[in-house]
Image: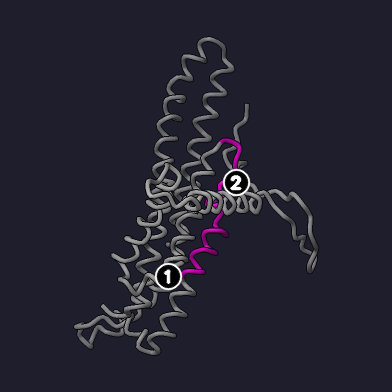
Amino acid sequence: MKVDPIHQFQIHDLIPMASIGGRDIAFTNSALVMLIIVASVSILLIGATAPRALVPGRLQSIAEVSYEFVANMLRSTAGNEGMKFFPFVFTLFMFVLAANLIGLIPYSFTVTSQLIITASLALTVFVIVVGYGFWKNGLHFLNLFVPKGVPKVILPVIVAIEVLSFLSRPVSHSVRLFANMLAGHITLQVFAGFIIMLAGWGVLGWFGATLPFIMVLLLTALEFLVAVLQAYVFAILTCIYLNDAIHPGH
């Protein structure tokens, strides 16, 4: 049996909507999963916090812990002034976390394995950082590229490196999440394919499929950890970048 580990990442049109400039615009499986993610997170948070019980239940505890986790992360990196960005960072964290976890469900679609999705999120962060940085600090925002105490002889080189590093942030921010989710799901699919192929060999094949089966279980646990960790990394990097916009200095 042929196993195609890339098939799980293919985008399919579900509902044709329009055609603009010879290009078809359609509602895709990726868009459907993103709607499910937004609806799931909204229902969880609104439904969990609606009772506002003094003794929180499980769902309310999850909502409160998520809130405090992101709030503490933002305060520790960007200070109290950074809390004005809490709705944005919290939404970003919950969306990426839910997308990663839903992607672990068999036959679902992992939207964070699509570079266009992660790049869009990273570029949104980048535009907000640059826009707020200039709005709040004016041209003083450019101090971000001029480290203090650097000798004037090498200052132009250092500034060029800082500018290049700053402009590459959306690339590293998006590719890190995309690559981790893509590689993990491909590895899972490959080992799951081994199980199917070996199982077709009869009784002997079932014994041979034991090792790939164990690997799939271990990789699933690892992917769950990666899903949570990558959501955290994406959010903490967003907080660090926002701190540069709020306090553009070294």
The relative height of residue 51 versus residue 78 in the rendered view (above or below) is above
Percent x, y for residue 27? 72, 55
Mark 1, Cα crowd under 10 Å, few <14 / some 14-19 / many 20+, is: some
Give the amino acid type for the residue marked by disc 2 in the picture: Phe
Give the colour scheme of this rendering. Answer: one colour
Q: How many marks?
A: 2
Task: Kindly identify the residue that appears in the image at 44 percent across and 52 percent down.
Answer: 52
Please give left or right for residue 199 compared with residue 169 in the image. Answer: right
Judge by depth and name the residue closer to the eye, 158 or 50: 50
Percent x, y for residue 22? 80, 65
User: Residue at label 1?
Assistant: 85
Q: Main secondary structure of the magenta part?
A: helix
| Residue stretch in magenta | 106-125
- Gap in angstroms between the C-alphas marked 1 and 2: 32 Å
> Element under label 2?
helix
Task: Kindly identify the residue that appears in the image at 52 percent across and 15 percent down.
Answer: 205
Name the quadrant containing residue 137: bottom left
User: Residue at label 2?
Assistant: 9
Q: Earlier in the sequence, mark 1 or mark 2?
A: 2
The relative height of residue 126 versus residue 142 in the rendered view (above or below) is above
Task: Kindly identify the residue that appears in the image at 23 percent across and 87 percent down.
Answer: 153
Judge by depth and name the residue closer to the eye, 230 or 159: 230
The relative height of residue 215 versus residue 53 in the rendered view (above or below) is above
Percent x, y for residue 35? 62, 53
